[in-house]
Image (cartoon, rainbow, N blue to C red):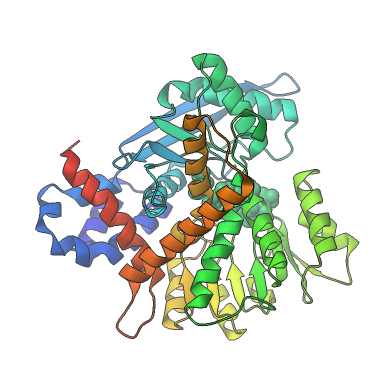
């Protein structure tokens, strides 16, 4: 396969979709060898069918704000691939959402879901609606208007949405409520639901906890102990907070957090009391990280409109905010300050330049599709519980999550180990994720 020509062709057909092209380019570069080894793949043009989404649904979402004004947003669902299971993936509400971003996320989700060992295809959806500053009733009306368009396209065995940036338990609850009203059915069509109506224990924690479990597996390959290690985290949403919580429990130091307005660096590390305060500020009051910095000027420094990477001395980095939030300069700064491992909570947070820096330095580097797969894994477990009409205990779900993260690590090591013993987690994750989907697609014919 000529990777360059393939990517150039996609670029011509889908101009103005840089994030989508970036995600495809990384995967295609790492699976080119395997793809070429099996001519049968090429004979059915499997690669193109795997890279171009099965279908994209787009629609206008009209809703009424608290002042009685009619507002219009765009809504989308990208159903990327359902070769190994129903379409599955989160919904993102953020002003930056566009088709390029959702296509990259749905593409990545397909490989991630394949790695989880569960039967889930890949999808992603969302809207350029920004929940920031909106009242609870505005959020509810928006969620209802969004699902009013989408409900016919989803279902427990068709497509199962969940949360992502800007979509948490509150939004999933409102979307589920409207879905239930439209279908007259109570099914597990959304995951990340409230515990009282079919949600799974540990789903809120799963992405963050899962990332820490993956990190532990990586550190074990080099006999490194997590205890006492300084960990830089970006973001302060669902993924970042539960990553920090688990790290603190395991005796690591959390030395940074951030939001879209800026970053805090805490040189001595967050205490449990400080973490509890931030957790409350962010989850209960939907506050800003700068508010914490104002209250604790002695413990931390606030960097307005900056990311944490250049300001922090850390052994480990866990970017958990958004795509392309860690570039080559940030990577070089982290490496100069002694960083030995990067485990991605966000989807595609490191730019290609940053990934090159990490891999050239031979540090442990796990891409999001492996390291953050814990969230969708527990979504898969929520689907299983819903269809059994059963609820598992927190211990049971957590144990399964731990097992799945270990399994994903093993797949990465199997397909990513290089001659000098270095584990290229990017190649490993992409190859393992690809092979399962590719085998299923081959067996199912050209559809
Ligand atoms: P949340 O909305 O809960 O939190 C997002 C955090 O990132 C917030 O602190 C937010 O700041 C910050 N952020 C968002 N966009 C930007 C931006 N453009 N620049 C700087 N900071 C930004 O989302 P999640 O924690 O759920 O998601 C974080 C990442 O993890 C995303 O990449 C998501 O795709 C990925 N992910 C999420 C999973 C899940 O289960 N939720 C599963 C796997 C991956 P602010 O509050 O200012 O907006
Ligand atoms: O990026 C992701 O894996 C998610 N946002 C979670 C998706 C899910 O279906 O739980």
Q: Residue at x 46, y 34 (%)?
A: 160
Between 9 and 375, the one lying in front of the other is: 375
Query: Can I make out residue 173 in this image?
Result: yes
Above or below 33: residue 329:
below
Between 127 and 192, the one lying in front of the other is: 192
- Asked where in the image residue 56 lies, by quadrant, the reply is top left
Q: Residue at x 43, y 21 (%)?
A: 152
Place of residue 379 in the rendered image (x, y in percent of width and height, measured from the top left): 51, 42
- Asked where in the image residue 276 lies, by quadrant, the reply is bottom right
* Quarter containing the N terminus: bottom left
Above or below 439: residue 423:
below
Place of residue 239 in the rendered image (x, y in percent of width and height, measured from the top left): 62, 54
Q: Residue at x 58, y 80 (%)?
A: 339
Q: Along the horizontal axis of the image, is 163 left or right of 82?
A: right
Place of residue 154 in the rendered image (x, y in percent of width and height, measured from the top left): 43, 27
Q: Residue at x 51, y 76 (%)?
A: 220
Place of residue 127 in the rendered image (x, y in percent of width and height, measured from the top left): 54, 36
Q: Along the horizontal axis of the image, is 272 left or right of 362?
A: right
Total number of numbered discs in the rendering: 0
- Asked where in the image residue 32 lies, by quadrant, the reply is bottom left
Query: Can I make out residue 354 in this image?
Result: no
Above or below 267: residue 344:
above
Above or below 170: residue 337:
below
Between 419 and 21, the one lying in front of the other is: 419
* Quarter containing the C terminus: top left
């Amino acid at each position: 396969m000529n990777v360059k020509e393939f990517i150039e062709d996609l670029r011509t057909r889908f101009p103005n979709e840089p994030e989508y092209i970036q995600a495809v380019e990384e995967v295609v570069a790492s699976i080119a060898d395997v793809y070429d080894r099996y001519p049968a793949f090429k004979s059915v043009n499997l690669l193109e069918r795997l890279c171009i989404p099965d279908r994209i649904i787009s629609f206008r979402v009209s809703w009424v704000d608290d002042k009685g004004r009619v507002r219009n947003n765009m809504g989308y669902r990208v159903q990327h691939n359902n070769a190994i299971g129903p379409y599955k993936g989160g919904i993102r509400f953020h002003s930056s959402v566009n088709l390029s971003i959702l296509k990259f996320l749905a593409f990545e989700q397909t490989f991630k879901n394949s790695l989880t060992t569960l039967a889930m295809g890949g999808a992603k959806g969302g809207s350029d609606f920004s929940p920031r500053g909106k009242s609870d009733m505005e959020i509810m009306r928006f969620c209802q208007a969004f699902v009013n368009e989408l409900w016919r396209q989803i279902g427990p065995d068709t497509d199962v949405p969940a949360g992502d940036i800007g979509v948490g338990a509150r939004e999933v609850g409102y979307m589920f409520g409207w879905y239930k009203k439209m279908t007259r059915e109570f099914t597990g069509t959304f995951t990340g639901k409230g515990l009282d109506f079919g949600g799974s224990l540990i789903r809120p924690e799963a992405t963050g906890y899962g990332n820490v479990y993956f990190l532990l597996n990586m550190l074990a390959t080099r006999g490194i102990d997590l205890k006492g290690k300084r960990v830089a985290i970006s973001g302060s949403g669902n993924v970042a907070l539960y990553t920090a919580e688990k790290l603190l429990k395991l005796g690591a130091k959390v030395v940074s957090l951030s939001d879209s307005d800026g970053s805090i660096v805490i040189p001595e590390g967050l205490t449990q009391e400080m973490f509890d305060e931030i957790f409350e500020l962010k989850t209960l009051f939907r506050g800003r990280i700068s508010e914490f910095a104002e209250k604790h000027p002695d413990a931390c420094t606030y960097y307005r409109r900056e990311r944490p990477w250049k300001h922090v001395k850390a052994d480990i980095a866990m970017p958990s905010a958004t795509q392309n939030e860690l570039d080559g300069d940030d990577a070089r700064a982290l490496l100069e300050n002694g960083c030995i491992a990067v485990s991605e909570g966000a989807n595609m947070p490191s730019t290609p330049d940053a990934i090159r820096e990490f891999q050239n330095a031979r540090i442990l580097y796990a891409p999001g599709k492996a390291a953050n797969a814990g969230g969708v894994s527990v979504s898969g477990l929520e689907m299983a519980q819903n269809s059994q009409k059963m609820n598992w205990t927190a211990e049971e779900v957590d144990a399964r999550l731990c097992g799945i993260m270990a399994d994903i690590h093993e797949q990465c090591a199997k397909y990513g180990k290089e001659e000098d013993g270095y584990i290229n987690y990017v190649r490993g994750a992409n190859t393992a994720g690809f092979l399962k989907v590719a085998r299923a697609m081959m067996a199912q014919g050209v559809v």
